[in-house]
């Protein structure tokens, strides 16, 4: 089987789980442990990518560029990645992230809007970065549409394209079908990023690799938005057992989770993501995983049921980045129920 | 009644053609030339109205002396080339591109006599037109130290010009929240939503303020809202201003008039309606011999 590259996103998607409260010292410890374990790429920044720190998505405790630098300083082999969502980030932030040590950028668009990545992918390629096209909410498009959009990103110069299951809404067969179609159509490698909202994150990743994906995402202890991502240590174990060629060492990856990241998160008093009725509804209704904590806050503020908020967001077809809609949905539900704002 | 002032439109794409339809209602302006660089539906529509057209660029139009106002709905690159030539020909440029050679103009906020002395003004971005008046209203009432806006637009309303320039779009909108809105710091986010039927433009505006008094803020916003409504009737609250701590939140929806573009493209409507409102004020001053 061909080599599978692991991208660990404990310090980016996992940042949602700690409400973006990582410190440079935290990041240095986790990045060093991941690098020592042999993980190929380490993604570091605000959960919503460069420029994500905001009232809408939550402010970070420390400037994310300082976090990028803290990670870049300690790694010997692993590459440092940042996430860039066109519409949120500006190119000057990407240039600064590169100066601070990031060499990979993942340019993320909604699955039907790949053409907004042109300016950013081309700029990043010109800067000499390794560029991953990240097609989010992959469940919202059929396979033909996904392939069409991936080809657009490839045409701009992307080095890899991901089918990103931001809502944790896909099942293993659906992932396999999508990845196989991408493999058949693209010249560049294909990746998959899973969320565990339906309990399928590891199974989906295995299905993706079986269908030809060679880039897979995880996070230590299954940190991440919604019910979290595929746990990196579990991915390493399962992929190795399936016969895939994975560089990371299983024991060391387990240790990075159990001895480094989890105690650090516990010390912050933050619970790990877990499967509950909210994350299940997100997977079932196809709602962007990062909405979860914001939806809980909005539901509390306006005295409505968070599940109603999530289902309504699914009905309104909110896409990634539309956390601002949560306020309105909660407000509307409260108003409809005759509750004062 | 005074004679209408003659205007031209460069770039008869979606924006330019919608402008053409809007300007046919204007009591102050008449479109006397439509300039393109290729055959297009916009050129055909202009011909249908009996308006002179060209697909060979701006030269012929520049030679028409009584055209006084020119709307540039091309792109930043072309406007940088057009601007000095329009100036040399003595024409007033209403710039709908991100070039922003002239100052940002938002009709409900900064239309002063100083502006009318200029010969190039910039219409910011659609998100800037939709959100900076509200930030301005909150700032004058409560002193905004941080403004953040999230504008959602339908995917269908975002043409190639927007899609290839999101970086500039965010930068310009962010700057307008400070320059026009008066915020000390600012952040602008834009999200394209592909839902069908298409969503109306929706703007979530969050301001952190030094004087959090909701009643004063509300009065100030209501005044601005009424003012914007005079040129964009479909500009309205989705969530009326609410206060939590020192953060004011309001959500504004923009429904377009449905002139040439469908009603869900309120984002394109608001920048065009603002451009027409500004140009009409220039035209009135020309009629009065003040320019």
Image: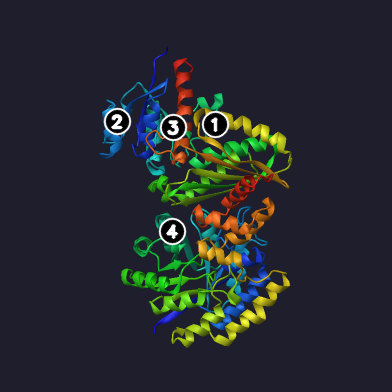
User: From the viewer's perspective, is the residue at label 2 or at label 4 nearer?
Assistant: 2
First in residue order: circle 1 vs circle 2: 2
User: From the viewer's perspective, is the residue at label 1 or at label 3 nearer?
Assistant: 1
Picture layout, residue A315 above or below residue B39:
below
First in residue order: circle 1 vs circle 3: 3
Residue on which the image places disc 2: B46
First in residue order: circle 2 vs circle 3: 2
Label 4: how many residues lie within 10 Å, few (<14), some (14-19) or many (20+)?
some
Q: Distance between the residues labelled 1 and 3?
A: 19 Å
Q: How far apart are marks 4 and 3 (CA)?
A: 30 Å
Task: Answer yes or no: are tags 1 and 4 on the same subunit.
Answer: no
Chain designation of label 4: A
The answer to whether any part of residue A12 appears in the image is no
User: From the viewer's perspective, is the residue at label 2 or at label 3 nearer?
Assistant: 2
Label 1: how many residues lie within 10 Å, few (<14), some (14-19) or many (20+)?
many
What coloring was used for the rendering? rainbow
Q: How far apart are marks 2 and 3 (CA)?
A: 19 Å
Q: Quadrant of the C terminus of chain A?
A: top right
Which residue lies at the image location 44% right of the left edge and 16% below the top edge? B287
Q: How far apart are marks 2 and 4 (CA)?
A: 38 Å
Q: In this view, does B44 lie to the left or right of A81?
A: left
Closer to us: B200 or A102: B200
Q: Quadrant of the N terminus of chain A?
A: bottom left
Closer to us: A176 or A64: A176
Residue on which the image places disc 1: B228
Residue on which the image places disc 3: B94
Task: Answer yes or no: are tags 2 and 3 on the same subunit.
Answer: yes
């Amino acid at each position: 089987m061909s080599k599978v590259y692991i991208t660990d996103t404990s310090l980016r998607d996992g940042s949602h789980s700690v409400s973006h409260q990582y410190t440079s010292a935290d990041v240095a410890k986790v990045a060093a442990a991941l690098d020592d374990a042999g993980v190929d790429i380490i993604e570091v920044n605000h959960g919503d990518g460069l420029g994500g720190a905001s009232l809408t998505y939550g402010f970070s405790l420390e400037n994310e560029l300082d976090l990028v630098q803290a990670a870049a300083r300690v790694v010997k082999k692993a590459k440092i990645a940042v996430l860039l969502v066109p519409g949120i980030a500006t190119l000057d932030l990407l240039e600064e992230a590169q100066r601070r040590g990031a060499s990979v950028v993942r340019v993320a668009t909604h699955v039907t809007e790949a053409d907004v990545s042109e300016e950013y992918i081309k700029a990043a390629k010109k800067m000499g970065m390794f560029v991953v096209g990240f097609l989010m909410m992959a469940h919202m498009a059929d396979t033909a549409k996904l392939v069409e959009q991936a080809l657009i990103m490839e045409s701009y110069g992307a080095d890899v394209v991901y089918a990103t299951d931001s809502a944790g809404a896909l099942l293993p067969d659906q992932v396999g079908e999508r990845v196989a179609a991408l493999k058949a159509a693209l010249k560049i490698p294909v990746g998959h990023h899973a969320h565990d909202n339906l309990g399928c994150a590891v199974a989906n990743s295995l299905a993706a690799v079986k269908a030809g994906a060679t880039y897979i995402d995880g996070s230590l202890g299954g940190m991440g938005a919604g019910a979290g991502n595929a746990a990196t240590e579990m991915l390493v174990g399962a992929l190795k057992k399936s016969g895939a060629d994975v560089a990371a060492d299983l024991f060391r990856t387990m240790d990075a989770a159990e001895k480094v990241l989890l105690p650090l998160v516990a010390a912050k008093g933050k619970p790990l993501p877990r499967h509950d009725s909210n994350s299940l509804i997100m997977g079932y209704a196809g709602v962007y995983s990062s909405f979860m904590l914001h939806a809980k806050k909005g539901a509390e503020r306006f005295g409505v049921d968070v599940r109603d908020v999530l289902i309504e967001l699914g009905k309104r077809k909110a896409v990634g980045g539309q956390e601002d809609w949560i306020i309105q949905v909660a407000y509307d539900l409260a108003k409809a129920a005759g509750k004062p704002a | 009644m005074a004679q209408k002032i003659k205007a031209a439109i460069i770039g008869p794409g979606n924006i330019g053609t919608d402008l053409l339809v809007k300007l046919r209602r204007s009591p102050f302006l008449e479109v006397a030339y439509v300039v393109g660089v290729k055959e297009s539906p916009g050129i055909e529509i202009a011909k249908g109205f009996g308006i002179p057209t060209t697909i060979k660029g701006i030269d012929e139009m520049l030679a028409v002396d009584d055209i006084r106002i020119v709307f540039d709905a091309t792109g930043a690159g072309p406007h940088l080339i057009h601007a000095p030539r329009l100036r040399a020909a003595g024409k007033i440029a209403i710039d709908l591109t991100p070039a922003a050679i002239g100052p940002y103009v938002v009709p409900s906020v900064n239309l002063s006599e100083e502006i009318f002395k200029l010969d190039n003004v910039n219409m910011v971005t659609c998100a800037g037109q939709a959100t900076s008046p509200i930030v301005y209203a909150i700032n004058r009432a409560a002193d905004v130290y941080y403004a953040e806006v999230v504008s959602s637009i339908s995917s269908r309303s975002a043409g190639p010009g927007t899609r290839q320039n999101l970086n500039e779009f965010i930068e310009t909108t962010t700057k307008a929240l400070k320059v026009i809105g008066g915020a000390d710091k600012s952040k602008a986010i834009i999200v394209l939503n592909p839902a069908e039927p298409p969503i109306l433009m929706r703007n979530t505006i969050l301001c952190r303020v030094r004087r959090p008094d909701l009643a004063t803020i509300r009065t100030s916003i209501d005044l601005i809202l009424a003012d914007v409504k005079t040129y964009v009737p479909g500009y309205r609250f989705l969530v009326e201003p609410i206060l939590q701590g020192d953060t004011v939140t309001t959500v504004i929806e923009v429904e377009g008039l449905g002139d040439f573009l469908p009603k869900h493209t309120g984002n394109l409507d608001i920048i065009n309606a603002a451009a027409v409102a500004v140009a009409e004020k220039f035209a009135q001053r020309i009629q009065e011999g003040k320019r």
